[in-house]
Image (cartoon, rainbow, N blue to C red):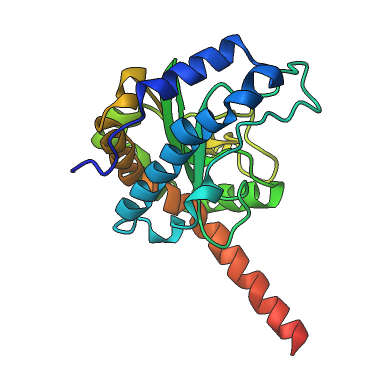
Amino acid sequence: MKSKFPGFSPAAITFLRDLKKNNTRDWFNPRKPVFEEKIRQPMIELVTALHQEMLRFAPDYVSDPAKCIYRIYRDTRFSKNKTPYKTYTSALLWRNGFPKDDCASYYFGISPEGIDVGGGVYSPEPESLLAVRQHIADDPAGFRATFETRKVKKLFGELTGETLSRVPKGFDPAHRAADLLKHKQYILWAKLDPALATTPKLFVELASRFEAMAPFIEFLNRPLLQRQAKQKREERFLRD
């Protein structure tokens, strides 16, 4: 796979490292143009390049690159940590037609400490989580086949995500997929060498992992698509 992104400049990583040491508005505000030039604009270019590659294997996750990038500003309303800025830059690539945080999505983040790349269901609504669990219960072998391949294990390791201590109510505790049904999150995750951020290899590493996890993402979103289609049919029936 040929890289479509040259990597971030060393100045971008230096900016994030300095921001961690000087996480105040007085430091950031006069340097906001540097942030826009060295971090936000390259992030848009990187997401654009990833979208071009994803047209091959995940075209329904291609949208406006700028909307995929998370804001640098932290939400401090309910946090004891009142520092105003994130010390990393990140993006979420989610399926068109869904709320941003209520479907399986692709994610990556860049910081001086490392590169995070992964995807899956992170914080679904209760109804969505139930639909995913029911889909897994109906076809556990099909689900395992999306993440227990040699390639996926090499790139991500094992399935991760917060789990319950017991099988959730409504499911048989002796179900052959009991270990999977305990999950509250279904995530594939890897942390890469931070040195990749300033090289063309960054794009290759992200794109190859996104492609490897595409069947996993699609499996998780299938019951959500079915539920969404059913809701639309019901809405049309009520209107008619």
* Left or right, 131 with reference to 195: right
Residue 111 x/y as whole percent: 46, 22
Report the residue that reaches farthest toward the top. 21
Count every numbered label the image shows and give the total.
0
Q: Is residue 187 visible?
A: no
Q: Taking 213 as reference, is 193 above or below it? A: above
Report the residue that reaches farthest toward the bottom. 240
> Which quadrant of the rendered structure holds the C terminus?
bottom right
Picture quadrant of residue 168: top right
Report the residue that reaches farthest toward the right. 77
Residue 173 x/y as whole percent: 60, 36
Q: Is residue 157 visible?
A: yes
> Which quadrant of the rendered structure holds the N terminus?
top left
Residue 193 x/y as whole percent: 33, 19
Q: Taking 71 as reference, is 14 above or below it? A: above
**Residue located at (26% from left, 37% from top):** 204
**Residue located at (60% from left, 31% from top):** 72
Which of 192/26 is in front? 26
Which of 205/147 is in front? 205
Residue 98 x/y as whole percent: 59, 58
